[in-house]
Amino acid sequence: MDHHEQHLQSSAWLTDIVIGMSDGLTVPFALAAGLSGAVSNTNIIVIAGIAEIAAGSIAMGLGGYLAGKTEADHYNSELKREYEEVELVPEKEKEEVREFFQNLGLSEEIQHQAVEEIAKDKKVWVDFMMKYELGLETPDPKRATKSALNIGLSYVAGGLVPLIPYFFISTPIDALKVSVIVTLICLFVFGFFKSRMTGINPWSGALRVTLIGAMAAAAAFGVAKLFEH
Amino acid sequence: MDHHEQHLQSSAWLTDIVIGMSDGLTVPFALAAGLSGAVSNTNIIVIAGIAEIAAGSIAMGLGGYLAGKTEADHYNSELKREYEEVELVPEKEKEEVREFFQNLGLSEEIQHQAVEEIAKDKKVWVDFMMKYELGLETPDPKRATKSALNIGLSYVAGGLVPLIPYFFISTPIDALKVSVIVTLICLFVFGFFKSRMTGINPWSGALRVTLIGAMAAAAAFGVAKLFEH
């Protein structure tokens, strides 16, 4: 069960940090790179970068909050509905439980016995329907708030990495060179740990994450150059 | 089963569009708003906005691609592992199947019969472990590519909404006023349909989405103003 445990542990706050840092390292990096090809001093890049980090962290943080809240609301409305259905159309709901056991590949005899055992207790029955008919897990009530903070702060942390060189170097292209080196290293390290967490090959995973960042930055640079003229 | 069907239908491409458009409407909007408080002509806002849309759509699109690929890789590596475990430690794996039925609230007799029926066929057994021990669904092989396109294009579509006023109006604050009105309306309409899709109250959902966009824009405006001086 080792891989199961690992799978579960890595789900909640680590997932949030990965979400926030993925975009935080990539989007402000690409924005700053894009502007470096189009403007002549770093002051405007710093302002745009800071505005983007503020906008992105709040949008993603509150987005995470909203997602958590929506998940909880959705769970509760489906829960109410299942309790009603078990009350109003018990035969139809029993048939759905039976179909579940049928799909597992169990014999008809066991299907019927299992249905009767589950339908004995309404709470067991409804929990079963929630989890295996609808695929919904009981949500953590504090998840929305925690999610918002984790995602938002990770975005800020990630976003400051590519931007910091622009604080100290006044020529955009020179600042860009430092920013590219520092950010690609961070993306590689981040991609390595992210991949190890999700159980894929960390080296190829790290390479993929780094390439995405590099491509986003190159595209932003190219597009901004086009619009400069 | 109406709500179940609905739940399934809305999962794949609609989820992608919601992901892309959520951030597309919010982040470029907030970035443009932030810059409107800090720079004196719209030209730089247009360049920054276009760079952000290019960066964001590529980062999010490729991020979606990577997520799809990672999911598929993860599934395949776990699948291989389960086949090995069923071969090497069948008693341990049977015990895990039994625990699953025990947790459903079934009697010991049914637990054992169900385990024997499932363990008869290795494919059935492994599929069972994948889905109910590890909670993994068989991924769609084209999902990664479709995801990337849906998310990326939705981000571009969403991001152009707040930016278009800056193409036609040369005073940042005047363009911002039009951008705020147009984008908040779009966020409200988008939030309405997004909420209806996920089964929560569409009016309060629409209000939440609109508020997040407004807060992100206000924060970016405030932060950029601070750094202007």
Image (tube, coloured by chain):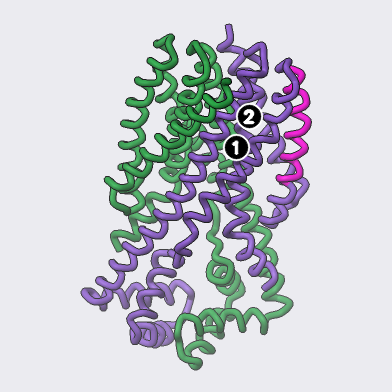
Chain colours: A green, B purple
Q: Is residue B189 magenta?
A: yes
Is B115 placed above or below A190 here?
Answer: below
Q: Which mark is residue A62?
A: 1
Q: What residue appears at the point 44 percent right and 45 percent down from the top-left corner?
A: A15
To which residue does mark 2 refer?
B216
Q: Is residue B203 left or right of residue A93?
A: right
**SS category of the residue bearing label 1:** helix
10 Å crowding of disc 2: few (<14), some (14-19), many (20+): many
Q: Nearer the viewer, residue A73 or A219?
A: A219
The chain letter under disc 1 is: A
Q: Is residue A101 magenta?
A: no
Give, as a single range, the part of the protein colored magenta.
B173-191
**SS category of the residue bearing label 2:** helix
Which quadrant holds residue A121? Answer: bottom right
Residue A201: give x, y in percent of width and height.
Answer: 28, 51
Residue B84: give x, y in percent of width and height.
Answer: 25, 71
Q: What residue appears at the point 32 percent right and 53 percent down from the top-left corner?
A: A200
